[in-house]
Image: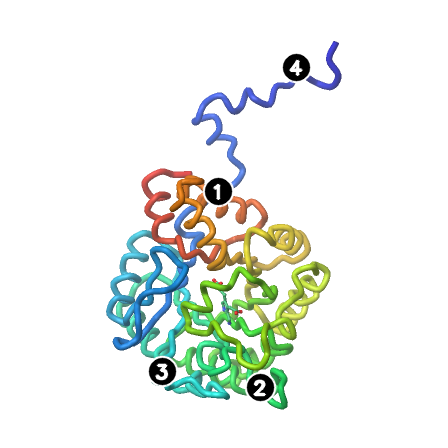
């Protein structure tokens, strides 16, 4: 005596062979879905990054080679993050608006290659401030509106240098509208704004902070007054709605895998491309477990990325983009 549809229904029938599993696969992943975040340095800064296996800070000429390779692999775009030399960091982070800074030089160098690959730039002050916060600190607080004034100028010089997509990651209120207005006034109406609309105050950013040299937050110990509380999902939806209203073209949710529910919910609720960011800590956890022989790192990485797509992401930032693109172009998944 059996209850339900079994034995007429046997879901295992469609899992018997790989061709059949492929035929009924509901989600796909290709190099075109991937965005590769790259850390850029000058010739005098160190290449090695604490806590991110296989990831190094690249000089501008190494960056050019890397981007050429990414384009050959069919990776959609690269996202640039600068390691600002320490003497150039300051309380107000004004190196961020220097049109000849490392970021702008890197954009020019990539654009000179004339490749069919996107350039996404980070609009935020943390790689430029000596206290490592994403905004300027006035009277012991990260000051929202004063920070926005600098972000507008930062977006402007990045747009001028040739960035295709501007990605504000600072979590100040109102910055998307302010940046959009400023870009429009300056004839940059075609520049795409990919907003980090929902950036949670997460411990998974640890290795990234050492990569950009922003690990010690002076004075204020965390970013909880501007990044979203990780227990909240309604609030995440409000952030997205607000950024769409202010003129964002695409939305980033970050970190990735632990926040798949937020990605799924956003995908159901909004008709705008949602991008997931598999952050440094997620990447490094997989690498560390693999290095210990505890999991198969390549398979676990692929699974994580596929799960983010299944949750509703149209694209994914991942430090594993080149190795995954190599794998995906060899085997179609
Ligand atoms: C800050 C920024 C962070 C990341 C991207 N932009 C760190 C932070 O908010 O402290 C993290 C990315 C990662 O961990 O891979 N503007």
Q: Name the residue under label 1.
A: 303
For label 4, the SS is loop
Alpha carbon distance from label 4 to label 1: 31 Å
Question: In the image, which is nearer the foreground, mark 4 or mark 1?
Answer: 1
Residue in front for this viewpoint, 218 or 198: 218
Question: How far is mark 2 from mark 3, CA to CA?
Answer: 22 Å
Residue 99 figure quarter: bottom left
Upstream in sequence: badge 1 or badge 3: 3
Instruction: Kindly tell me whether residue 194 is visible in this rendering.
Output: yes
User: Do the numbered discs 1 and 3 sit on residues whose CB atoms are within 8 Å?
Assistant: no
Total labels: the figure holds: 4
Q: Which of marks 4 and 1 is nearer the N terminus?
A: 4
Looking at the image, is mark 2 or mark 4 nearer the viewer?
Answer: 2
Horizontal arrangement in the rendering, residue 51 relative to residue 151 (left or right) = left
In the current view of this chain or complex, which residue is farthest to the bottom?
Answer: 139
Dot 2 corresponds to which residue?
Answer: 137
Give me the C-alpha separation between circle 2 and circle 4. 66 Å
Q: Quadrant of the C terminus?
A: top left
Of the residues tagged 2 and 3, which is closer to the observer?
2
* Residue at the disc numbered 3: 101
The location of residue 253, given as percent across then percent down, is 57, 60
Residue 109's place in the image compared with 136, above or below, is above
Asked if ligand 1 lies within 8 A of label 4, the reply is no
Q: Where is residue 309 in the image (x, y as percent from the top left)?
A: 53, 48
Residue at x 65%, y 56% (from the top left corner): 266
Mark 4, Cα crowd under 10 Å, few <14 / some 14-19 / many 20+, is: few
Sort mark 1 into few (<14), some (14-19) or many (20+) by Cα contacts within 10 Å: few
The answer to whether the residue bearing label 3 lies less than 8 angstroms from the nearest atom of ligand 1 is no
Residue denoted by label 4: 8
């Amino acid at each position: 005596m059996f209850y339900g549809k079994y034995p007429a229904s046997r879901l295992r029938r469609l899992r018997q062979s790989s061709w059949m599993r492929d035929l009924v696969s509901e989600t796909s992943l290709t190099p075109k879905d991937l965005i590769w975040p790259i850390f850029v340095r000058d010739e005098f800064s160190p290449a090695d990054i604490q806590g991110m296996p296989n990831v190094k800070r690249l000089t501008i000429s190494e960056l050019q080679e890397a981007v050429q390779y990414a384009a050959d692999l069919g990776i959609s775009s690269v996202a640039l993050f600068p390691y600002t030399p320490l003497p150039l960091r300051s309380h107000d982070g004004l190196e961020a608006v220097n049109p000849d800074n490392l970021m702008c030089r890197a954009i020019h160098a990539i654009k000179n290659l004339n490749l069919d690959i996107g350039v996404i730039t980070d609009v935020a002050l943390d790689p430029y401030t000596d206290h490592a916060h994403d905004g300027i600190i006035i009277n012991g607080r990260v000051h929202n509106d004063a920070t926005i004034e600098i972000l507008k100028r930062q977006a402007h010089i990045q747009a001028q240098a040739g960035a295709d997509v501007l990605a504000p990651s600072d979590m100040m209120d109102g910055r998307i509208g302010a940046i959009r207005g400023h870009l429009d006034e300056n004839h940059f109406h075609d520049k795409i704004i990919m907003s980090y609309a929902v950036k949670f105050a997460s411990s998974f950013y640890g290795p990234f902070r050492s990569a950009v040299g922003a690990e010690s937050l002076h004075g204020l110990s965390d970013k909880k007054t501007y990044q979203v509380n990780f227990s909240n999902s309604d609030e995440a939806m409000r952030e997205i709605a607000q950024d769409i209203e202010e003129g964002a073209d695409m939305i980033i949710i970050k970190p990735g895998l632990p926040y798949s529910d937020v990605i799924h919910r956003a995908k159901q609720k909004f008709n705008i491309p949602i991008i997931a960011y598999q952050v440094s800590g997620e990447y490094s956890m997989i690498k560390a477990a693999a290095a210990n022989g505890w999991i198969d790192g390549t398979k676990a990485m692929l699974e994580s990325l596929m799960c983010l797509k299944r949750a509703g992401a149209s694209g994914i930032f991942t430090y594993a983009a080149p190795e995954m693109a190599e794998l995906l172009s060899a085997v179609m998944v």
